[in-house]
Structures are given as structure tokens and as C-alpha cells.
Image (cartoon, grey):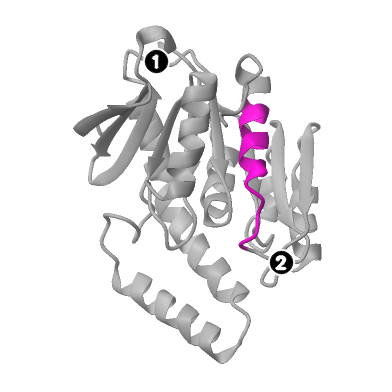
């Protein structure tokens, strides 16, 4: 079992940001700066493809969850992303993706294959990270745990949630069902799912098929007009309200 080691710490606007490592996996933990959040809910997040743990989407969502709800939020760099080195396999898959993109060929088959490979590596890393975070006295083992990941974050988070009983609510979206539908059938917790109606990479029917595969009795589909990278910013506020509804009091979104 790996222990968690904090490497840097800073605080701003009531949010404490601490970089950490679990083994050789780097991550970041955002928490309320006060002690009032002891044993508050923990939201694990996963970043999108080509991004990293402190991408603005991650820090922005964390700010909403910490400042608005008093939650703890943690992200780790996916394999081959952020501060982690790329393997020869990573380099080959990325080169193939860029080649297909330049040639105007479908990206889906490459992204699905590569994300599945990354998930097999990242899922045990997230479990080890959760183990280590729950050893912290301010988090502990008695608070609820959620998961939030879109795009590649769904590719990693969905198989994690399928096998991790500590996670009891999740936000997913924008991925193909190819390697995930069977695992989605194992998930019964509350789900919020984002889909772009005019996604140029993920056919509408594919996104709907993945949503339909979840066995959850409480699952909500948010379908918005727009292309793959045009997910409305207000969906972040909706996800925060989703977690607040299940884990805590109602939240007023920051201006």
C-alpha cells in the first residue's frame, strides 16, 4: 500500500491546494482552508485527454465544489499526461491519432482503444489514491465519495466506479460505448450524464447507448446543442448541484 506524501501547499480565497504523490503518481488535493470540512465528502475527478491535473477545467470545478459545498476534491495525472512520462505505446497512439486527424479519418477507434489502455493503468492508481486520501484525518473513511470525469475522464472513471463500492454518485459523459457499456450495466448509483447533440466525433446514437447502459434507477441525461468541445459551462454548476444534492446541502454557485 502506497502512502501519500504532500510536496507543495498554497492557499487562496479560502481554498487550500496541496500537491501530492502516491507512489510515483502525482496528484493535487483541494480542500477548504478551515477545519470545518473535517470528514466532508470527497470528489475524485479525472481530466480529459491531453490535459493534466491542474487544467483550468479541473481547478475551476474544484473551486466550485470546495468554496460552494465545503467538499474535498482530488485529481491525479493520467498515465502519460501532465507530470508523468510517456511510454513508447503512448507516443505511438498519440502519433496515430494526429495522423488520422490530419487525414480527416474518424478518431473514435483510436481514442477508444487508447483510453481503454489508459484506464487499465489508471483504475488501480485511483484506488490506491483513494486508500491514501482516506488515511488523512481530515477525510477519513466515513464520508461519502463521488466521481466526476468527462471524455477520457469517463473512460477511466466508469470502470473505476463499476468496481469501487466507496463511490456512491458520479458525473460522466461524452464517450463511446464500445468498451464501457458492459461495465456501465454494473453501475446502479445515481448518475448525471452529459452529451453534445451535434458531437462531430461521438455519434448521437453512441452517446445515448452508453447512457442507456447504466443500470442506475436514478440517472439524468443532459443533452446540449453543440459540438464536442462546446459543452456549456453551466453543466459544471449542474454537476456541483448534483453532488450537493446527494452529499450535502444546496449550493449557491459562485458568480
- Mark 1 lies on a secondary structure that is loop
Nearer the camera: disc 2 or disc 1 = 2
Q: Main secondary structure of the magenta part?
A: helix
In the rendered view, tell whether residue 31 sits above or below residue 153: above
- Mark 2 lies on a secondary structure that is loop
**Quarter of the figure with the C terminus:** top right
The disc label shown at residue 140, or none: 1
In the displayed orientation, state which residue is furthest to the top: 36
Q: Residue at x 58, y 50 (%)?
A: 150
Can you give x and y, in whole percent of width and height, for residue 209 in the image?
79, 57
Residue 42 seen in render: no
Can you give x and y, in whole percent of width and height, for residue 35 in the image?
36, 9
Q: Residue at x 79, y 64 (%)?
A: 204
Q: Is residue 235 magenta?
A: yes
Can you give x and y, in whole percent of width and height, for residue 124 in the image?
41, 44
Q: Which residue is more in the foreground, 252 or 138?
A: 252
The residue identified by callout 2 is 199
Q: Is residue 136 left or right of residue 59?
A: left
Q: Residue at x 81, y 64 (%)?
A: 205
Q: Which residue is more in the foreground, 148 or 209?
A: 148
Which comes before the other along the chain, label 2 or label 1? 1
Q: Is residue 138 left or right of residue 101?
A: left
Circle 1 packing at 10 Å, graded few (<14), some (14-19), many (20+), is some
Can you give x and y, in whole percent of width and height, for residue 41 in the image?
50, 20
In the rendered view, tell whether residue 74 sits above or below residue 177: above
Which range of residues does the magenta coloring cover? 229-243
In the rendered view, tell whether residue 239 sits above or below residue 112: above
Amino acid at each position: 500500500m502506497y502512502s501519500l506524501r504532500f510536496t507543495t501547499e498554497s492557499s487562496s480565497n479560502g481554498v487550500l491546494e496541496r500537491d501530492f504523490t502516491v507512489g510515483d503518481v502525482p496528484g493535487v488535493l483541494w480542500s477548504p482552508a478551515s477545519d470545518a470540512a473535517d470528514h466532508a465528502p470527497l470528489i475524485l475527478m479525472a481530466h480529459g485527454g491531453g490535459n493534466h491535473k491542474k487544467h483550468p477545467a479541473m481547478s475551476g470545478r474544484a473551486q466550485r465544489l470546495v468554496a460552494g459545498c465545503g467538499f474535498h476534491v482530488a485529481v491525479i495525472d493520467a498515465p502519460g499526461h501532465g507530470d508523468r512520462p510517456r511510454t513508447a505505446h503512448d507516443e505511438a497512439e498519440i502519433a496515430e491519432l494526429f495522423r488520422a486527424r490530419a487525414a480527416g479519418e474518424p478518431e473514435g477507434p483510436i481514442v477508444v482503444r487508447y483510453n481503454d489502455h489508459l484506464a487499465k493503468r489508471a483504475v488501480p492508481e485511483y484506488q490506491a489514491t483513494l486508500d491514501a486520501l482516506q488515511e488523512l484525518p481530515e477525510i477519513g473513511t466515513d464520508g461519502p465519495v463521488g466521481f466526476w470525469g468527462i471524455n477520457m475522464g469517463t473512460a477511466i472513471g466508469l470502470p473505476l466506479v463499476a468496481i469501487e463500492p466507496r463511490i456512491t454518485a458520479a458525473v460522466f459523459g461524452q464517450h463511446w460505448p464500445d468498451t464501457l457499456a458492459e461495465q456501465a450495466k454494473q453501475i446502479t448509483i445515481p448518475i448525471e450524464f452529459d452529451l453534445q447533440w451535434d458531437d462531430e466525433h461521438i455519434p448521437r446514437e453512441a452517446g445515448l447507448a452508453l447512457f442507456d447502459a447504466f443500470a442506475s434507477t436514478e440517472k439524468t441525461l443532459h443533452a446540449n446543442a453543440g459540438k464536442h468541445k462546446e459543452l456549456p459551462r453551466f453543466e459544471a454548476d449542474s454537476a456541483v448541484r448534483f453532488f450537493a444534492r446527494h452529499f450535502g446541502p444546496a449550493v449557491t454557485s459562485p458568480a
